[in-house]
Image: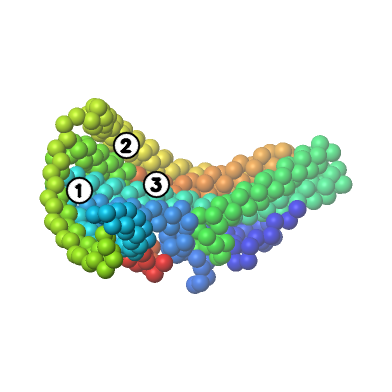
C-alpha cells in the first residue's frame, strides 16, 4: 500500500535514491527545524490562529461566558421596580327588590389599572446576589482562559506530530530503498559465490520488516492528520518548521512554580468560586432580615354598581415584613452553604497542588527533551561513522551482511529518536508555558485579534430591557 499525502503536506525529505548523503539529510531534517517550507507555508503560529478562531470547544466556552454575563443583569433587576398593567371586562346581572320595588339591572363592569412595586430593603440580598454573579463571571473567564490554553497546546501537539510522523515516514521509506539496494547487491554476490543463501534470507527478512514499518508510519501519519484537522480545523498544508517557545519559559523551576501559583487560570477560577460561595451565604442570611417594599397603584373602573358609574382610585402602600420562624429551612440552607464554602476552599488548595505538580512535570520533560536532542545527535553521528565502517569492512570480507543490516537499523533508530526528541523539545516548551498559565495569544505571538470577554459583559450588565443579544440575535 502506498500512502498518498494530502496536497501540500510538507516533505521532510525528498524521495531520492538511497545514498548516504540523502539519508544524512533525512536524519537531520528535524534538527534543522523539520524542513523549511516555501514562503506560503503554514506556520505553527498561523495554525494556532486558526484553532483560536474556529475551535468548537473554545467557541462553546466563549458562549458559556456570555450566558454567564447575563446573570449579573438578572441579579441587578432586584434594584429596579416592577410594573404591570391589568384590564378586565365582563357582564353582571342583578335582580331583586329594593324598598318593595322590583329591580333587574344589567351592567358591563370593567376597568384598567397600573401597579408598581419597588423593593426598598431585602436584607442586602440583591447586593450579594450581584456580587455572587460577578464572581461567577470572573470564574468563567478564567475557565475560558484555561480552555484557550488547552486548545492551543493541543494545536501545538498535533502540528508537531504531523511534522515528526512525516519525517519518520520518509526515513522508513528511504530505509526500504536502502534495503532494496542491499538485497540486490547481496543477491549479486550470492550468484558469484561470495555470500551464502543465509545472507540473502537475512536481507529479505530485514526488507520485509522495513516495509511493515512503513505501513505503521503511514498509519501514524494518518492519525496525526486527523487529529490536526480536529484541533486546527483544516487539513495540514505545507507545514513550516516548529520552534520552541523558550522566550516565555522561566529561568528556573522555582520561578516557574511561583508564576504558576500566581497566574494559572484554574487557581484564579477556584478562588473566584470561593468568593461566589461566600456571597451565597450572605444571600441566604438576608432571608432572615426584614423586607421593606413600596407599592403604588391606580385604577379606572366602570359600571361597578350601576350602569354608567365611573370612578378612579389610587393608592401608595408601604409594607414591612419581619420573618419570625419558617420551620428552620433558612437556617439549614445557611449551614449547608457554609459547608459548600469550605469545600470550595479545599478545592482551591487541591488545584494549587495540581498546578505545582504540572509545572514540575513539564519542566522535567523539557529538560529531558533537551538532553535527548543532544544525545540523539551524537548517536546519529556515531552510527553514521559506524555504518560506513561496517560497509567498508564487509566489502573486504571482515563483516557479514547481518552486521551491515544491524548497523543500518541502529542508524535508522537513532534518526527516529532524534525526530522524537526534537518534537518533544518543541511540545514541552509550550507545555511549561501552559503549566504556568501563560499559553495564550498574548504570549504566543499568534497573529489574531484576542477575544475580549469584557466587551460583551459591558454591553449587557446594565441593560433594563431588550430581547436581542448584542450580536443581533
Q: Is residue 462 left or right of residue 238?
A: left
Picture quadrant of residue 307: bottom left
| Mark 2 neighbour class, 10 Å CA radius: few under 14, some 14 to 19, many 20 or more | many
Element carrying mark 3: helix
**Callout in the foreground (3, 2):** 2
Q: Is residue 380 left or right of residue 427?
A: right
Residue 23 x %, y %? 61, 55
**Marked residue nearer the N-terminal end (3 or 1):** 1
Residue for point 41% across, 40% down: 365
Residue 320 x %, y %? 13, 44
**Callout in the foreground (2, 1):** 1
Tell me the CA gap for discs 3 and 2: 17 Å
Q: Nearer the viewer, residue 89 or 100?
A: 100
Residue 172 x %, y %? 65, 50
Q: Is residue 305 left or right of residue 357?
A: left
Picture quadrant of residue 276: top left
Q: Which color scheme is applied?
A: rainbow
Q: Nearer the viewer, residue 67 or 342?
A: 67
Which residue position is annotated with label 3? 431
Tell me the CA gap for discs 3 and 1: 43 Å
Element carrying mark 1: helix
**Marked residue nearer the N-terminal end (2 or 1):** 1
Q: On screen, 153 above or below 442?
A: above
Whether the residues at callouts 2 and 1 have beta carbons within 8 Å, the answer is: no
Which residue position is annotated with label 2? 351
Which residue position is annotated with label 1? 126
Q: On screen, 364 above or below 319?
A: above
Q: On screen, 165 above or below 445?
A: above
Tell me the CA gap for discs 2 and 1: 31 Å
Element carrying mark 2: helix
Whether the residues at callouts 3 and 2 have beta carbons within 8 Å, the answer is: no
Residue 452 x %, y %? 31, 61
Amino acid at each position: 500500500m502506498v500512502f498518498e499525502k494530502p496536497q501540500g503536506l510538507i516533505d521532510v525529505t525528498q524521495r531520492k535514491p538511497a545514498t548516504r548523503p540523502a539519508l544524512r539529510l533525512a536524519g537531520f531534517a528535524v534538527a534543522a527545524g523539520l524542513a523549511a517550507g516555501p514562503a506560503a507555508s503554514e506556520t505553527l503560529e498561523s495554525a494556532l490562529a486558526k484553532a483560536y478562531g474556529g475551535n468548537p470547544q473554545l467557541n462553546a466556552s466563549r458562549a458559556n461566558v456570555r450566558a454567564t454575563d447575563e446573570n449579573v443583569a438578572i441579579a441587578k433587576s432586584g434594584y429596579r421596580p416592577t410594573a404591570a398593567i391589568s384590564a378586565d371586562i365582563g357582564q353582571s346581572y342583578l335582580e331583586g327588590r329594593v324598598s318593595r320595588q322590583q329591580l333587574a339591572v344589567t351592567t358591563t363592569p370593567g376597568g384598567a389599572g397600573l401597579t408598581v412595586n419597588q423593593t426598598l430593603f431585602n436584607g442586602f440580598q440583591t447586593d450579594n446576589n450581584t456580587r455572587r454573579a460577578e464572581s461567577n463571571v470572573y470564574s468563567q473567564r478564567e475557565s475560558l482562559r484555561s480552555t484557550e490554553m488547552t486548545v492551543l497546546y493541543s494545536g501545538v501537539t498535533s502540528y508537531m506530530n504531523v511534522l515528526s510522523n512525516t519525517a519518520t515516514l520518509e526515513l522508513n521509506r528511504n530505509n526500504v530503498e536502502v534495503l532494496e539496494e542491499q538485497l540486490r547487491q547481496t543477491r549479486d554476490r550470492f550468484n558469484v559465490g561470495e555470500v551464502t543463501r543465509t545472507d540473502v534470507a537475512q536481507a529479505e527478512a530485514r526488507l520485509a520488516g522495513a516495509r511493515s514499518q512503513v505501513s505503521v508510519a503511514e498509519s501514524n501519519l494518518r492519525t496525526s492528520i486527523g487529529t490536526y484537522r480536529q484541533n486546527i480545523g483544516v487539513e495540514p498544508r505545507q507545514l513550516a518548521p516548529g520552534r520552541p517557545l523558550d522566550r516565555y519559559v522561566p529561568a528556573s523551576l522555582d520561578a516557574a512554580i511561583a508564576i504558576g501559583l500566581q497566574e494559572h487560570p484554574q487557581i484564579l477560577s477556584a478562588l473566584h468560586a470561593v468568593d461566589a460561595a461566600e456571597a451565597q451565604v450572605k444571600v441566604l442570611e438576608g432571608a432572615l432580615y426584614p423586607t421593606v417594599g413600596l407599592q403604588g397603584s391606580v385604577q379606572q373602573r366602570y359600571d361597578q354598581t350601576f350602569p354608567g358609574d365611573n370612578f378612579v382610585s389610587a393608592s401608595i402602600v408601604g409594607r414591612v415584613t419581619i420573618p419570625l420562624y419558617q420551620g428552620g429551612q433558612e437556617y439549614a440552607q445557611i449551614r449547608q452553604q457554609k459547608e459548600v464554602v469550605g469545600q470550595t476552599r479545599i478545592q482551591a488548595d487541591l488545584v494549587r497542588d495540581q498546578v505545582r505538580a504540572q509545572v514540575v512535570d513539564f519542566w522535567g520533560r523539557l529538560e529531558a527533551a533537551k538532553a535527548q536532542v543532544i544525545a540523539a545527535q551524537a548517536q546519529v553521528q556515531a552510527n553514521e561513522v559506524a555504518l560506513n565502517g561496517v560497509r567498508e569492512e564487509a566489502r573486504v570480507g571482515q563483516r557479514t551482511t547481518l552486521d551491515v543490516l544491524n548497523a543500518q537499523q541502529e542508524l535508522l533508530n537513532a534518526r527516529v529518536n532524534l525526530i522524537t526528541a526534537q518534537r518533544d523539545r518543541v511540545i514541552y516548551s509550550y507545555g511549561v508555558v501552559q503549566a504556568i498559565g501563560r499559553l495564550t495569544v498574548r504570549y504566543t505571538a499568534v497573529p489574531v485579534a484576542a477575544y475580549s470577554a469584557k466587551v460583551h459583559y459591558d454591553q449587557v450588565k446594565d441593560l433594563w430591557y431588550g430581547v436581542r443579544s448584542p450580536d443581533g440575535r
